Image (tube, rainbow, N blue to C red):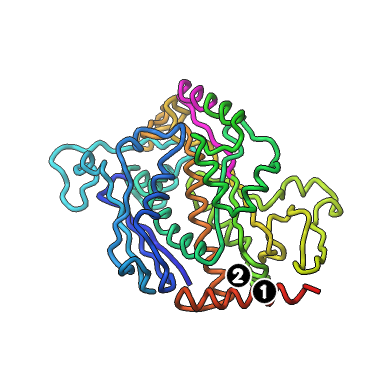
């Protein structure tokens, strides 16, 4: 089974990740990893940090001649901004100059709870590790799982349906056409937009909303649409809570900084309707087997994959660092004061979509490995084809 860990501070020397459990024999290129890291850095509304960093992953172990070895893979992403923080973030030697402590927490951030939890007299360590800069390491790690899945015909893609009040209309035939070509087709189309939207009209509205928020010293959140195609029926399980695929996917998405809500399919709209207008009816088609004309369940039934496109929606709150401050207080003097500003983005929703794609990849990969087992790519590919053929034969007549 695949698991990964990340390490590193936002302004430390580097971010790192160790990925364990990837099968052997998967073709990996540095370009594939770095392309995903570059996608994470794009989007209208990003801040000054993205002008400093050009994220590139260095592989230290687990890959030989472009193929995974089945052993742990180590990834390093160096922080170029480290050169400006060597005194503030020194690991061992305390600098001679005085380093000012941060004692004013920002509302909506990890600052206050983190300081209390870990007993710090300075909020800086909380800021450094809770920062969404950490997602660069997760994108690099998750990309390995995405590559593994794609080699088996499973693709993951995303687009942004809302930023602030700018919301795309209901999905139409264009989205269906893109999904029929595989979920990555959705991402390729979305990536042509500076806000990763499919509608040009809504794109214009979103760009204007971001620009206006920036002028006000404010921030904007939005909604991310994530799709996974090519997953056969029966991944995950209903027999124990920790084997439920829907729960694992929701957990992965909620682990992304600033994500505050997850929806599967049209769950919240479904909650307002009677069951007769919600559940996806089953039909048998000669030569095809089981088909459904709707996908309101979002590709997940009974905590397992239904064989349809998996559709997840994530709600991202506006970023907590505001140029125009909210009310806070100084934890040392206990005096009320405006909150401080830490360099930040106006809107990072487009980038969060890229992160969402990569954090769900290990979840799907683990569901596949739980079902099929296997230690190298060709072994797993053969088992998956046998399973897919079994499904086809079971219901064709």
Residue 195 falls left or right of residue 105: right
In the rendered image, which residue does mark 2 sit on?
A: 243
**Disc 2 packing (10 Å; few <14; some 14–19; many ≥20):** some
Residue 212 falls left or right of residue 267: left
Q: Where residue 90 sits in the image (x, y, percent)?
A: 20, 48
Residue 383 appears in the picture as rendered: yes
Give the Cα distance between marks 2 and 1: 7 Å
Label annotation for residue 163? none
Q: Is residue 103 magenta?
A: no
In the rendered image, which residue does mark 1 sit on?
A: 239
Q: Is residue 223 above or below residue 341?
A: below
Residue at x 63% of width, y 76% of height: 387
Q: Where residue 316 sits in the image (x, y, percent)?
A: 55, 42
Residue at x 46% of width, y 61% of height: 147
Residue 115 appears in the picture as rendered: no
Tell me the magenta residue range. Answer: 209-224
């Amino acid at each position: 089974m695949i698991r990964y860990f990340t390490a590193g501070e936002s302004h430390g020397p580097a971010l790192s990740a160790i990925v364990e459990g990837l099968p052997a024999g998967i073709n990996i290129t540095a370009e594939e990893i770095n392309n995903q890291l570059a996608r994470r850095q794009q989007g209208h509304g990003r801040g000054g940090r993205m002008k400093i960093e050009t994220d590139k992953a260095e592989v230290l172990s687990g890959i030989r001649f472009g193929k995974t070895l089945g052993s742990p893979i180590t990834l390093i992403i160096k922080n170029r901004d480290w050169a400006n923080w060597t005194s503030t973030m020194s690991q061992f030697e305390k600098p001679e100059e005085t380093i000012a402590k941060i004692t004013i927490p920002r509302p909506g951030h990890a600052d206050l709870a983190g300081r209390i939890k870990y007993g710090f007299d300075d909020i800086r360590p909380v800021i450094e590790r809770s920062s969404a800069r950490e997602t660069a390491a997760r994108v690099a790690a998750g990309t390995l799982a995405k590559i593994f899945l794609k080699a088996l015909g499973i693709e993951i893609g995303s687009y942004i349906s809302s930023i602030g009040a700018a919301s795309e209309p209901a999905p139409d035939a264009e989205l269906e056409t893109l999904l029929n070509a595989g979920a990555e087709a959705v991402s390729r189309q979305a990536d042509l937009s500076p806000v990763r939207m499919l509608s040009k009209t809504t794109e214009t509205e979103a760009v204007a909303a971001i620009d206006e928020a920036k002028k006000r010293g404010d921030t904007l959140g939005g909604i991310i649409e994530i799709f996974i195609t090519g997953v056969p029926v029966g991944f995950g399980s209903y027999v124990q809570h920790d084997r439920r695929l829907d729960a694992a996917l929701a957990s992965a998405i909620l682990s992304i900084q600033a994500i505050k809500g997850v929806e599967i399919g049209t769950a919240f709209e479904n909650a307002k309707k009677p069951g007769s207008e919600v559940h996806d009816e089953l039909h048998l088609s000669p030569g095809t087997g089981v088909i459904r004309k709707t996908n309101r369940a979002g590709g997940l039934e009974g905590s397992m994959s239904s064989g349809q496109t998996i559709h997840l929606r994530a709600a991202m709150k506006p970023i907590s660092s505001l140029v125009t401050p909210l009310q806070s207080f100084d934890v040392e003097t206990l005096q009320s004061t405006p909150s401080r500003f830490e360099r930040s983005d106006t809107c990072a929703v487009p980038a969060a979509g890229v992160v969402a794609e990569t954090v769900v990849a290990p979840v799907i990969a683990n569901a596949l490995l739980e079902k099929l087992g296997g230690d190298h790519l060709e072994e797993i590919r053969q088992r998956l084809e046998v399973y897919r053929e079994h499904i086809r034969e079971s219901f064709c007549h």
